[in-house]
Structures are given as structure tokens and as C-alpha cells.
Image: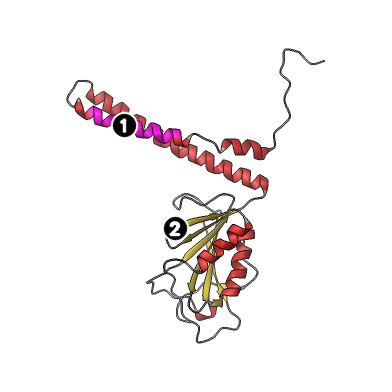
């Protein structure tokens, strides 16, 4: 017989429910605290030279530093919780960087629209596509190990994919697409807008093949089997 004074454990919640709750961390409230603490400095300047001024400035600076560090930690907690929840639910999120903007797609329809954005970016230059358990929001933070660079000639409706994979040890491997029926008339597309580095001509594929590969990548996050690949090399070849 159980002890009536002891709480009986309730039914276990699905992990996805717990992780979803963990994503609701008070980052916005912390931003307001940081802003309010920064505004204190204006008042401190009004009492410059007072015997207490130095200690007040020290504590205000220490508080700002601690709050900013706490914000980084909360963002990390939120991001990991989003990834854990999505993994439990079998959800992946595609992130595209095209025309200098970031776009996120969690659903199949959104991912198809994302592929259109990287094939036809608003501004010249390379686009990038990532697939992860969460949006890849911070380019300076650790992110997914795989990515695809997309360079296209929209008028000719052709382009090149460059797939890069990083091991957990930091070793990089890179492949270009390979066109088994390449043409000498194919354009030598630049690595990026204004770059003198060129993709080989036999890496150029029509949009229909690029779309098939990118659609596959948004589903799997792995190097697509829909197209052929070759070890990355450079030059007008």
C-alpha cells in the first residue's frame, strides 16, 4: 500500500511536449532587462565624480555582462530544445540563404518554394541550402555539417551544385555536380558573384536536374542521389 503522504507520479509526458515547453524561455524579458540596465548609464553620467560613481559603474557593467551571457545561454537552451522537439516529431527544417536573406521551411510545400528561391535568387551570387533539426539562424554558431552551394544562370536555366560535408573532427569534403553529357558550350559559372574562381563546365546541369537534387536534399539532408557527383575541382575545365 502506498504512503498517502507521498505524491504519486503522474503520467509521463511525451518528450516532444517537454521539449516544446523548454523552447518558451524568457529571452524577450531578458532583452528588456538588458535595455533597462544599459539606460542606467545615462543617469550615472549625471553623477560623474561622486564618491559612489566608480562602484556604481562597476556593478552596472558587471550586470550588463552577466545579462548578455545569460541571454546567450538561454538562446542555446531554446535552440537545442527546438532541435530536440523536432527530432522527436520527425521534423527537419530547411534554411536557405539567397540574395542576402535567410528563409526557413519546415513543411514540404515550404521546402519546394525554398528551392525556387535558391534557383532564382533576387540578387546575383551563390545561394546556400542547409537541412537541420532547427532553423540555421546564426551563421557564426555551430550548424549543420552538410550544405549545398547553388550557382545558377537563370536566363539559360542551368547551374551547379557544390555539396560540402564536415566531419565531427572538422575535416571538410566537397563535391560538384557532374553532367555525364556535358557540353563545351556550357558556361563556366563563378564560385560567387565577381569571383575569378570557376566551376568546371562538366558540373553544369539543367534546372530540372538541380531541382530534383535540391528537393531530395531538403527531405534527407544528405548528398542527393538524384544527380552524379565529382570531387571538387576548380578552373575553366
The boundaries of the magenta stretch are 29-44
The residue that appears at 50% across and 79% down in the rendered structure is 156
Q: In the rendered structure, are the residues bearing label 2 and label 1 in contact, judged by CB atoms less than 8 Å apart?
A: no
The image position of residue 142, as x and y in percent, is 50, 50
In the image, residue 105 lies at what x, y percent? 57, 55
**Magenta region's main secondary structure?**
helix
Closer to us: 11 or 233: 11
* Left or right position of 189 against 214: left
Task: Give neighbour class at mark 2: few <14, some 14-19, many 20+ (Cα, 10 Å).
Answer: few
Query: In the rendered view, would you say 136 is above or below 193?
Result: above
What residue is drawn where x is 26% and y is 24%? 55
| Residue 223 visible | no
Asked which secondary structure carries label 1, the reply is helix
- Give the labeled residue for mark 1: 61
The answer to whether any part of residue 183 appears in the image is yes
Q: Quadrant of residue 228?
A: bottom right
Which residue is at 45% across, 81% downward? 236
Q: Mark 2 points at which residue?
A: 101
> Could you say whether the residue bearing mark 2 is in a helix, strand or loop?
strand
Amino acid at each position: 500500500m502506498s504512503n498517502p503522504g507521498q505524491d504519486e507520479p503522474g503520467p509521463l509526458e511525451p518528450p516532444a511536449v517537454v521539449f516544446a515547453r523548454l523552447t518558451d524561455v524568457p529571452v524577450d524579458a531578458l532583452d528588456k532587462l538588458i535595455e533597462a540596465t544599459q539606460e542606467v548609464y545615462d543617469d550615472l553620467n549625471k553623477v560623474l565624480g561622486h564618491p559612489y560613481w566608480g562602484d556604481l559603474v562597476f556593478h552596472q557593467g558587471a550586470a550588463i555582462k552577466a545579462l548578455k551571457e545569460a541571454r546567450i545561454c538561454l538562446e542555446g537552451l531554446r535552440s537545442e530544445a527546438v532541435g530536440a522537439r523536432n527530432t522527436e516529431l520527425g521534423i527537419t527544417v530547411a534554411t536557405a540563404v539567397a540574395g542576402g536573406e535567410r528563409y526557413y521551411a519546415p513543411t514540404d510545400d515550404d521546402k519546394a518554394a525554398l528551392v525556387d528561391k535558391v534557383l532564382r535568387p533576387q540578387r546575383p551570387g551563390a545561394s546556400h541550402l542547409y537541412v537541420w533539426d532547427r532553423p540555421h539562424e546564426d551563421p557564426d554558431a555551430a550548424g549543420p555539417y552538410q550544405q549545398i552551394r547553388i550557382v545558377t544562370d537563370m536566363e539559360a536555366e542551368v547551374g551547379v551544385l557544390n555539396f560540402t560535408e564536415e566531419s565531427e573532427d572538422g575535416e571538410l569534403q566537397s563535391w560538384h555536380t557532374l553532367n555525364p553529357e556535358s557540353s563545351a558550350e556550357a558556361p563556366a559559372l563563378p564560385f560567387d558573384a565577381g569571383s575569378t574562381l570557376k566551376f568546371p563546365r562538366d558540373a553544369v546541369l539543367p534546372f530540372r536536374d538541380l531541382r530534383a537534387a535540391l528537393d531530395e536534399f531538403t527531405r534527407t539532408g544528405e548528398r542527393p542521389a538524384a544527380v552524379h557527383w565529382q570531387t571538387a575541382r576548380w578552373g575553366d575545365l
